[in-house]
Amino acid sequence: MTNNAEGSNDGSLTPIDPRTGKPGPAVTVDDPYNMYFTPDGKYAIVVAEAHERLDFRDPHTMQLIGSVEAPQCKGINHADFSIDGRYAIFTCEFGGYLAKIDTVNRSLIGYLKLSKGGMPQDILTAPDGHKFYIADMHADGVFVVDGDSFKETGFIPTGPGTHGEYPSRDGKFMYVANRGSHKIHGPRHSPGSVSVIDFATDKVVKTWPIPGGGSPDMGNVSADGKLLWLSGRFDDVAYAIDTQTGDVKKVPVGAEPHGLTVWPQPGRYSVGHTGILR
């Protein structure tokens, strides 16, 4: 778990025993906002957002191994990896760019400016491992990018405030959380929804509105694939959404829940974020 101290450049990582849920001793790192693991298990990547920097660390000791500067990537944030794990693409939340990172040589490959919108959020690799989907909160939809050539190839409209992306358990569909607002601190009861995109056609096949309005944000799918769990960022709830019917149950939680992890997940390798495994 990352602990970012708002308004400062210090923070820590808190290890949590997955069997007991108990935290261990915190590890001091520099400005942690997000965290990933390379698919080969070689590195943990701590996203030092305020510094436009990625810190590659030993995944067991958290000792710093090296850093990659991405000065053009304002608000460097979410990421996903190519099928072979040799590169990752990070979103630049406050600049409308993507940054492509060589995870083997720990270097910046280059940037891609998105054609519209300007507030890219979550990013998800397609089942083929080469195509990437980028949610953009201002564009109200999902950009499609060829990861190898690093070129934008399409756009899929979804809903207001497009933010989180999660694959169905069978790998046929992508659930896209639309927060219902373009604002970082949006209002309660916004017109939030979940769009279901068919990976084979890149078309929205279903839209599930949040009854009474809401702000679906980040989360994950249950191990059996029957429930999509998402935090309700501005409504102080978590949503449990039936992936067959789209029916929504609301669970009251604390103020402004941002991330949500469903654990354990099927898979062999953790790539971090909200408990994403491969």
Image (spheres, rainbow, N blue to C red):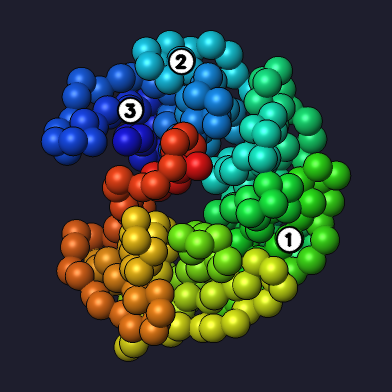
On screen, residue 27 versus residue 201, left or right, reads left
Mark 1–mark 3 contact, CB under 8 Å? no
The residue to which callout 1 is attached is 144
Q: Residue at horizontal 50%, vertical 62%?
A: 170
Query: How dense is the environment of label 3, judged by Cα within 10 Å: few (below 14), some, or many (20 and up)?
Result: many
Q: How many marks?
A: 3
Mark 2–mark 3 contact, CB under 8 Å? no
Across and down, in percent, residue 134 comes to: 64, 57
Q: Nearer the viewer, mark 2 or mark 3?
A: 2
Q: Nearer the viewer, residue 39 or 181?
A: 39
Across and down, in percent, residue 269 comes to: 46, 34
Residue at mark 2 to residue at mark 1: CA–CA distance: 32 Å
Q: Vertically, is 123 above or below 249?
A: above
Judged from the image, the secondary structure of the residue bearing numbered disc 2 is loop
Q: Nearer the viewer, mark 1 or mark 3?
A: 1
Residue 85 seen in the figure? yes
Where, quadrant-wise, is the N terminus in this rendering?
Answer: top left
Q: Residue at horizontal 68%, vertical 47%?
A: 129
Type of amino acid at the residue the image marks with label 1: Val
Q: Name which of mark 1 and mark 3 comes first in the sequence.
A: 3
On screen, residue 78 versus residue 82, left or right, reads left
The residue to which callout 3 is attached is 13
**Image quadrant of residue 137?**
bottom right
Mark 2–mark 1 contact, CB under 8 Å? no
Residue 234 seen in the figure? no
Judged from the image, the secondary structure of the residue bearing numbered disc 1 is strand
The residue to which callout 2 is attached is 58
Query: How dense is the environment of label 1, judged by Cα within 10 Å: few (below 14), some, or many (20 and up)?
Result: many
Judged from the image, the secondary structure of the residue bearing numbered disc 3 is strand
